[in-house]
Image (tube, grey):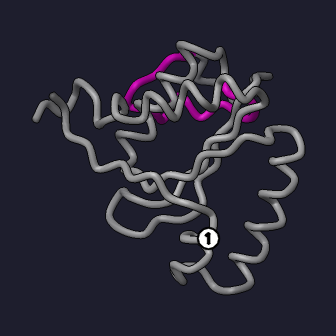
Amino acid sequence: MALSTLRPSSIERYLACEVNSPEERDSSALEREDRLRRFPYAVMLEVAYPELDYAHRWCWQRFGPMEGSCTQKYSEYRVCSDETEHRHTGKWTSHWFVKTDYDFGYNEFYFSEQADCDLFLANLPEIHWGEHYPK
């Protein structure tokens, strides 16, 4: 069993957290609306960085690459070995909203297909800090 600090959350909870300024929260909400047009199924989490890396790997293994600029060279659980700046096209993506504590904050996952979102939600109990952090 590995360490787990992940908590399901919501956009409302993020907007109420007051870590960012009201202007930053408003801007984030508008940018989120743009992402939701392409990826209408969203899951907001409060998550630690290692859990985020683990969740990204989990999604890559099941749904293919994440849409957008590849940040895998910084990941603790890498799935893309290309260290150059590049982008991927995919049917899911992820967005970090704000850090609320040491290596912990709000991140939202977005899916273009309901079935992928449902599978992710069903497997949230399996998302943890990963094999680098045994309990």
Query: Foreground residue, 114 or 55?
Result: 114
On screen, residue 25 above or below 63: below
The residue at the point 62 percent across, 70 percent down is: 12
* Residue 77 is covered by the magenta coloring: yes
The residue at the point 31 percent across, 35 percent down is: 128
On screen, residue 98 above or below 5: below
On screen, residue 26 above or below 60: below
Dividing the image into 4 quarters, which one contains the C terminus?
top left
What residue did someone put label 1 on?
A: 12
Q: How many marks?
A: 1
Q: Which residues are magenta?
A: 66-81
Q: What is the quadrant of residue 131 in the picture?
A: top left
On screen, residue 122 above or below 46: above
Label 1 sits on what residue type? Answer: Glu
Q: What is the quadrant of residue 105 in the picture?
A: bottom left
* Residue 60 is covered by the magenta coloring: no
Query: Foreground residue, 130 or 85?
Result: 130
The residue at the point 47 percent across, 65 percent down is: 99
Near mark 1 (Cα within 10 A), the count class, few <14, some 14-19 or many ≥20, is: few
Task: Give percent across and percent down for residue 65.
Answer: 66, 19
Task: Give percent across and percent down for residue 1.
Answer: 15, 28
Query: Foreground residue, 77 or 60?
Result: 60
The residue at the point 36 percent across, 57 percent down is: 103
Task: Give percent across and percent down for residue 17.
Answer: 51, 78
Q: Is residue 24 left or right of residue 4?
A: right
Q: Is residue 84 left or right of residue 23?
A: left
Residue lying farthest left? 135
Classified by dominant secondary structure, the portion drawn in magenta counts as loop
Q: Is residue 33 left or right of residue 123?
A: right
User: What element does badge 1 sit on?
Assistant: helix
